[in-house]
Image: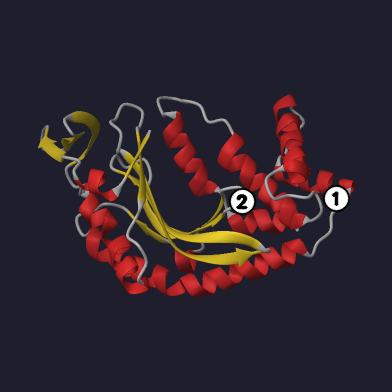
Amino acid sequence: MKTVNATQALALDITETALNVEFKEIRIDGEYSATVGNDRSIPSFDQLLAPFVDLSNAMQCEFNPSIKLMRSSHGADGTIYSISMPYKMIKLGERDTECRIVRHGSLNSSCSDRFGLQMLVQICSNGMMGWKSEGNAVTRFTANWQGISQGRIDLALGSFDSMQAHYVELANDLKAITLTAEGVTDRLNRIVKGESKRAENIREEIRELFVSGKGNRGQNSWDLFNAVTEYENHYKVYRNTNGVTSDENRAKGVLALDTDKLASLVA
């Protein structure tokens, strides 16, 4: 995995070569990326970055997206992409939090293109992903993907203010719930199920982060929420599995983290 800026991403040479009537090969800067069906459209980074340009103009914020280029099982860096750009600061549970627009996806059909809201707690760099239906644009790269994607992105952008208000309220509600040691144990058993040694170790690691994680005081459900997201963002181990790289598994893991479901488990 490597991280590049917009200029470097735009300079990537993404090419398509037909293999037969059904499939074509994608290469990034000459390196093999993926084999996909001929009916699949391959986006350029100019197209993927267009909403970030539009938002920076509308919000009068700096156009400075960070772009992570990841490999698939056999593909080049950039086969999987993760783009994020900050556009304003808010408070979540009294913690300084950076609002970002994010876009994750792949060129090889392993995951759909997703565009949404992320809130990054500054003290610990833990991310809350806004993959709620009203603030989440999911698109597959079919022949007419651009028109479909733009409509969904416009709807997502229009819902960001209400989503921010939702997460501010969620953080305040969790902060108001004081937890005893028994309450923490009950919630950890709901979050990490099972009696295996691995499950026990994960629960203990999160328990330690609840008390001593960055910004945490071991007091309330907001501390436990941040302990779980700190574990997911910084300590969870992702491995290569069945031809899928650890980078790809990590990208999918980030997408699978349901903020509202987690909030209900720690409340």
Query: Residue at position x 43%, y 33% from top?
Result: 247
Q: Is residue 111 left or right of residue 54?
A: right
Q: CA distance from mark 1 to mark 2?
A: 25 Å
Image quadrant in which you'd find residue 93 = bottom right
Identify the residue shown where x is 38% and y is 72%.
155
Residue 167 placed where, x, y %? 60, 66
Q: Which amino acid type is marked by label 1?
A: Gly
Judging by the rendered image, the residue that carries numbered circle 2 is 123
Q: Position of residue 152 (x, y in %)?
A: 35, 67
For the residue pair 71 and 58, the one nearer the viewer reads as 58
Is 51 situated above or below 197?
below
Name the amino acid type tagged 2.
Ile
Where is 25 relative to 113, above or below? above
Q: How many marks?
A: 2
Mark 2, residues whose alpha carbon is within 10 Å: few (<14), some, or many (≥20)? Answer: few
Give the SS element for disc 2: loop
In front: label 1 or label 2: 2
Which dot marks residue 183? 1
**Residue 90, picture quadrant:** bottom right
Report the front residue among 131 and 54.
Answer: 54
- In the picture, measured across the screen, residue 176 lies left or right of residue 242, that is right
> Viewed as shown, does residue 147 lie left or right of 66?
left
Q: Residue at x 31, y 26 (%)?
A: 74
